C-alpha cells in the first residue's frame, strides 16, 4: 500500500483537491492519500518548498510526494519527477520540489513526457488533476520513474538560504511563521554548536531591544515572554510562551534578521 | 474498496465531520473516505450543488457521494439517494445533489425510507451522522439502492443557470468565486464555439471598462492584469494573473454579468 | 484495519500534521487515519477535551484517539495512554483526554514510559510526532497497552461543568460555540426531563430579554429568530434559524449563563 501526499495552494473550499483525489484513486485504488496542506498562500512557491522539505522526511520509503504551487501552469515550464533517497517527488519545475530533493545525496530528476499517462483532455490551468495526479498514481502502483521521460541535469532550484558568519557570531533570518506564530529560522542547530555551547549563546531579534537566551522548551519563560529555542525541525526558532511571536515581535518570513552572538 | 466522498457546510473545527466518519468506518471499515470540502458557507445549497457537480465526475464507478448542506434538517424534507451513471449520491432533497445528478443521462432517484439502517437514535438536527452516514456505508458495502425506498419522479432540482443569447453574442454570469479569486462563469466552452472562433471573441465584465480577450493561460497577460480563459471545468473564467479577480473586479457569484461579444 | 484519529491545535498550514501522519503510516501502514480537527485554538485544552468527548463515541472498538493540545510540551507533564470501554486514547496528561475517558465506566490510565518506541531523536517541542505518533501506531497494530508503562491512579482531569439546580429550575452555561454559531450548553436532555415536560420549559439566555421555548428543529421559528433545542449531542443548544446565534446573542463559551425555568 503506497502513500501519495499532496501539498498545494488549492485551499479546502473548492473542488480542486477532491477532483485530484478522484483521479488518483481511480487509477491507484489501493494507495493512501495524505494531505500535507492545501493552504500554501496562492502562488507562494518558496513557502511550498519549505513545508514540503520539513514534511517529507517523516514518510516511509516509496512515498510519492505531489507538490503543486504552479503560477506558471500552461506555460512552457516543465513538469518533473524526482527521486530523492527512496521517495518520489512530482510537480512543476519551478523550485517547489527542490528544497526537499536537495536533502538527499542520491537523487535523480526527469522530465514528465509520457503524455499517454495524462487525462485524455489536459486543461491549460489544472495540471494537478490532468498531469500530476495520474503520474503520481502511476508511481504509487510501482511504475518505473525511468519510463516517464529524459533525465535532466538542469532544473529549477530554490537555494536554501544559508546563514552568514560575522565577527560577533552568525546571522540568519526568519524563514517561516507557523500557525502558532513561531518564527522558524534558517539557523540549524549544528551551526549553533559550531560557534559555542548553546546555553552560552545570545539571540538578537531585529526590532527587539533585549537579547534572548536559548531555552529548551516554551514553559521555561513566563507566559507572554519571548524566547529562542531549537525547534522540532532542528532550526533555531523565535517564540512567545502561550502567545504569537510573529504578531508580538513583528516577525516577517524572508525579512526579519536574527543574529546569534557569543556571550 | 469503495470510495465515500463527503461535502458539507460543517467546517473543520467541531466534531461533526469526525463523528460522521466514525459511523461510516464502523459500518464499512474498508471504504476510503475522501473530503471534497466542509467549507461550504453555512446553508449555501447552491454553492454545495456546484462544487459537487465539478468534483464528482473525476471519481471512479461505484463511488458514493454524500452531500449535506441541510438548513431544513428535521422538517418534512425528504432524504434521498440518487444514481447518476454508475455513481451514487446521498443527501437531503433540497437540490444539493441535483446539479451533479443532472450531468448523467441515465439516472434514478429514490427516497431513503429504510429506517432500520439509521443509527438507533436519530437526532432532529444531525442527519449527516444519523441517517446519511449509515446509508452511505450501506451503499459502499454494495447494498442495493433499490432496497432503500420508493422511486421518486418528483424531487428538488436547482436548475443550472443557462446562458442567454443576445444580438451581440451571449450573456452569462459569475457562478462561483474560487480560493484564488477566479470567477468561474456559467458559460461553457461549447457555447463560445457556437458563436465564433474563441480567439476572435471579446469578454465584457460588468463594471470593467475595457473588454478582455480570451487567453489560454494566466501567464499570457502581465502580472496584475485581468484576463478571460476557458477554465479547467470547461467554463469561461475571469481571472487576474497572480492576483484576486474577485477583489480587483468586484465579482459576485450569481450577480456579476458577463457578456461575450463577437469582434 | 484499525483507526487512528487525530485532534490537535496544529492547524492545516504547516508540516506538523503531515509529519505525524508520515510517522504513523511508516509504522502502521494498514491503519486508517481520520482527522477530527486540527483547528483547536492554540493551547485551548478545554475545547480540545470537549471536541474529543463528542467525536470519539461514534468510532468503532479498538480505535486509537490521539489528542494533542500541549502547551506544556517538554516540561515534566506526563505522556499518558488511556483505555475507555474498548477504545484507546493517547496524549499529554493535561486533561485533554479526560472528558472523553470519563464517559466510560470501565477505564484505565497508564504512563507512557517505553522510550524505545519513540522516534530516535525526541524533540522538546513536538511530542505529537516523536512520542504520540509512534505510540498510536503501536496500539493500532495491536500492541499491548499494558506494556507501555505503569498504571496511574492520579491523572489530570478537567471536570465536565455540571448544571446547578435553583428554585426556579436549573442553570448551566454555554460550553462551545460551533461553526454555525450555535451555542452548545452543558445542560443534558435528561436533566431537562427531570424538571418537567420539555415542551413546558422556558429557556432564558443571559442578555436576551425574552425567554425561548424548546423546539425540535431550526425551521420551527422564522428565519433570523432565536430558539432553543436539544442538539445532536444531547445537550440544550441555543441557535438562530439560518443565522449565527453566537454573534446575534453574544454567546461566549464558559461565560454566558443559561437558565431553564418551569412555566
Image (tube, coloured by chain):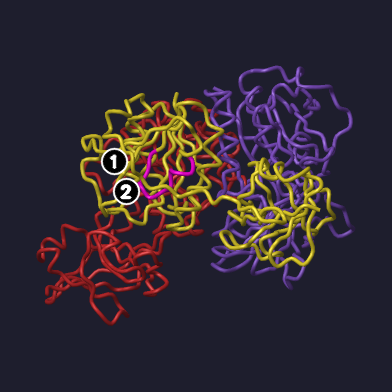
Chain colours: A purple, B yellow, C red
The answer to whether B179 appears left or right of C211 in the picture is right
Expressed as whole percent of the image width and height from the top left, the position of residue B84 reads: 45, 32
Q: Secondary structure at mark 2?
A: helix
Residue C208's disc number: none
Residue C84's disc number: 1
The answer to whether A221 appears left or right of C207 in the picture is right
Callout 2: chain: C
Span highlighted in magenta in the image: B90-100
Question: Dividing the picture into quarters, in which one does residue C196 lie?
Answer: bottom left
Mark 2 surroundings within 10 Å by alpha-carbon count, few (fewer than 14), some (14 through 19), many (20 or more)? many
**Which residue corresponds to mark 2?**
C100
Q: Is residue C12 above or below residue C119?
A: below
Q: Is residue C29 above or below residue B71?
A: above
Expressed as whole percent of the image width and height from the top left, the position of residue B73 reads: 31, 53
Residues tagged 2 and 1 counted as in contact (Cβ below 8 A): yes
Residue C199 in sight from this viewpoint: yes
Callout 1: chain: C
Expressed as whole percent of the image width and height from the top left, the position of residue B180 reads: 66, 53
Residue B242 in sight from this viewpoint: no
Q: Is residue C168 above or below residue B116?
A: below
Q: Residue furthest bottom?
A: C209
Question: Dividing the picture into quarters, in which one does residue B227 lie?
Answer: bottom right
Front residue of C197 and A106: C197
The answer to whether C6 appears left or right of B122 in the picture is right
Q: Secondary structure at mark 1?
A: strand
Sequence-first tag of 2 and 1: 1
Q: Which residue shows up at 60% across the image and 31% down it?
A: A4
Question: Dividing the picture into quarters, in which one does residue B235 lie?
Answer: top right
Expressed as whole percent of the image width and height from the top left, the position of residue C101 reads: 30, 46
Q: Quadrant of the N terminus of chain B?
A: top left
Amino acid at each position: 500500500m503506497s502513500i501519495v501526499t499532496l501539498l498545494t495552494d488549492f485551499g479546502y473550499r473548492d473542488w480542486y483537491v477532491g477532483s485530484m483525489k478522484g483521479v488518483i484513486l481511480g487509477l491507484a485504488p489501493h494507495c493512501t492519500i495524505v494531505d500535507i496542506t492545501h493552504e500554501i498562500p496562492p502562488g507562494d512557491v518558496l513557502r511550498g518548498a519549505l513545508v514540503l522539505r520539513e514534511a517529507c522526511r517523516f514518510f516511509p520509503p516509496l512515498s510519492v510526494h505531489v507538490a503543486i504551487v504552479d503560477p506558471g501552469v500552461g506555460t512552457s515550464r516543465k513538469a518533473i519527477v524526482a527521486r530523492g533517497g527512496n521517495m518520489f517527488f512530482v510537480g512543476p519545475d519551478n523550485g517547489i520540489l527542490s528544497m526537499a530533493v536537495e536533502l538527499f545525496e542520491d537523487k535523480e530528476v526527469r522530465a514528465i513526457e509520457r503524455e499517454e499517462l495524462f487525462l485524455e483532455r489536459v486543461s491549460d490551468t489544472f495540471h494537478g488533476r490532468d498531469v500530476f495526479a495520474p503520474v503520481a498514481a502511476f508511481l504509487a502502483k510501482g511504475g518505473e520513474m525511468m519510463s516517464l521521460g529524459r533525465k535532466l541535469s538542469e532544473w529549477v532550484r530554490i537555494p536554501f538560504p544559508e546563514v552568514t558568519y560575522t565577527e560577533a557570531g552568525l546571522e540568519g533570518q526568519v524563514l517561516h511563521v507557523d500557525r502558532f506564530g513561531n518564527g522558524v529560522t534558517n539557523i540549524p542547530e549544528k551551526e549553533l554548536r559550531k560557534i559555542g555551547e548553546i546555553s552560552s549563546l545570545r539571540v538578537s531579534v531585529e526590532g527587539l531591544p533585549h537579547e534572548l537566551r536559548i531555552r529548551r522548551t516554551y514553559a521555561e519563560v513566563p507566559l507572554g515572554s519571548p524566547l529562542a529555542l531549537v525547534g522540532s525541525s532542528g532550526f533555531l526558532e523565535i517564540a512567545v510562551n502561550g502567545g504569537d511571536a510573529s504578531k508580538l515581535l513583528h516577525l516577517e518570513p524572508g525579512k526579519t534578521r536574527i543574529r546569534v552572538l557569543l556571550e
